[in-house]
Image (cartoon, grey):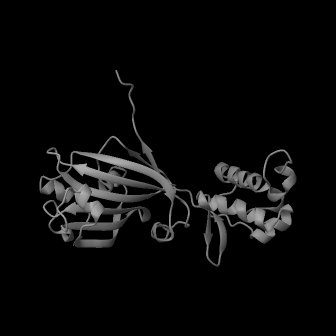
């Protein structure tokens, strides 16, 4: 529980330590990271915090909103603000080409999928270019929300040539398992990773606040022959994933 003593500005607010909203933010963040404010702890309303601290409501709102954007605090409609539940981060290697199902199985987690799209569609200009298709060709598309132990972690949207996946309806769990059965599992891939804030639709699917940090990954995978197997766009929760790469000095 957040007490009046905890919010008392004489313990954390000083004239020389920068903007007031930033000092409040740092005070709350330190307490969250140290465990002084436990996960799911309810925060007083912005009006109450403003009354206790003597700060303006705009200052309090700015501090809280910055913590919401970073995933430290969540806001539940009609219930108020709470310290975000602690998320166990998944470490994902960038040096191995594996599927989500394989990654989670190695960690002993139960994998689930919620289908968002699955079928054959006219290729977009980007899909045709990356998959090296003729103009007005069709592609197999599968899009799904991926969950581990019931927690939504990623949104995957994959496009494949029809000679690689003629019937996307046969994919039920692991796409790579299906490709392996047809001797078409990719052997290498190029990935581009970028950071950004989740929009309303993706945040709702991942059950996080809109604007929280996320990781966008575009991956193009290839057979040993050089043929493109898949083009995948994925959105990962920034609070749930750490991507790790081993680097070696050349020469």
Specify the farthest residue to the front. 135
Name the quadrant of the C terminus.
top left
- Residue 84 place in picture, x, y as percent: 60, 61
Residue 145 located left or right of residue 172: right
Q: Residue at x 39, y 32 (%)?
A: 247
Viewport quadrant of the N terminus: bottom right
Q: Which residue of the protein is positioned furthest toward the bottom in this rendering?
A: 78
| Above or below: residue 200 compared with residue 22 | below
In the picture, residue 176 is in which quadrant? bottom left
Residue at image point 87% right, 52% down = 10
- Inspect this view and state whether residue 240 appears: no
Residue under the point 86% across and 48% down: 15
Q: Position of residue 66 (x, y in %)?
A: 65, 59
Figure check: 48 above or below 215: below
In this rendering, the answer to whether 131 lies above or below 93 is below
Figure check: 104 above or below 188: below
Left or right for 243, reference 72: left
- Position of residue 24 measured from the top left corner of the image (x, y, whole percent): 76, 55
How many labels were placed on the picture?
0
Q: Quadrant of residue 146?
A: bottom left
Which residue, as the protein is rendered here, is positioned at the far top? 251
Q: 244 or 82: which is nearer to us? A: 244
* Depth check, front residue: 220 or 171: 220
Residue 94 at least partly seen: yes
Horizontal and vertical percent for residue 185? 18, 51
Residue 41: image quadrant is: bottom right
Q: Residue at x 28, y 63 (%)?
A: 125
Q: Going by the image, does 117 lie left or right of 87?
A: left
């Amino acid at each position: 529980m957040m007490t009046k003593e905890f919010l008392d500005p004489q313990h954390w607010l000083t004239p020389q330590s920068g903007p007031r909203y930033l000092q409040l933010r740092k005070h709350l963040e330190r307490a969250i990271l140290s465990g002084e404010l436990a996960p799911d702890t309810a925060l007083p309303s912005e009006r109450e915090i403003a009354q206790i601290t003597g700060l303006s409501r705009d200052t309090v709102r700015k501090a809280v909103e910055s913590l919401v954007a970073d995933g430290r605090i969540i806001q539940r409609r009609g219930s108020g603000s709470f310290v975000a539940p602690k998320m166990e981060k998944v470490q994902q290697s960038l040096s191995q080409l594996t599927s989500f199902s394989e990654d989670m199985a190695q960690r002993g987690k139960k994998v689930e999928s919620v289908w968002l799209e699955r079928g054959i569609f006219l290729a977009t200009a980007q899909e045709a270019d990356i998959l090296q298709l003729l103009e007005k060709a069709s592609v197999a598309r599968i899009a799904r929300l991926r969950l581990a132990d019931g927690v939504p972690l990623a949104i995957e949207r994959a496009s494949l040539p029809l000679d690689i996946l003629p019937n996307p309806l046969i994919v039920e769990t692991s796409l790579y398992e299906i490709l392996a059965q047809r001797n078409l599992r990719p052997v290498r891939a190029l990935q581009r990773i970028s950071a950004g804030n989740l929009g309303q639709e993706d945040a709702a699917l991942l059950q996080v606040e809109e604007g929280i940090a996320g990781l966008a990954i575009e991956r193009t995978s290839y057979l040993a022959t050089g043929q493109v197997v898949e083009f995948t766009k994925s959105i990962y929760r920034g609070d749930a994933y750490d991507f790790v790469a081993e680097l070696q000095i050349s020469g």
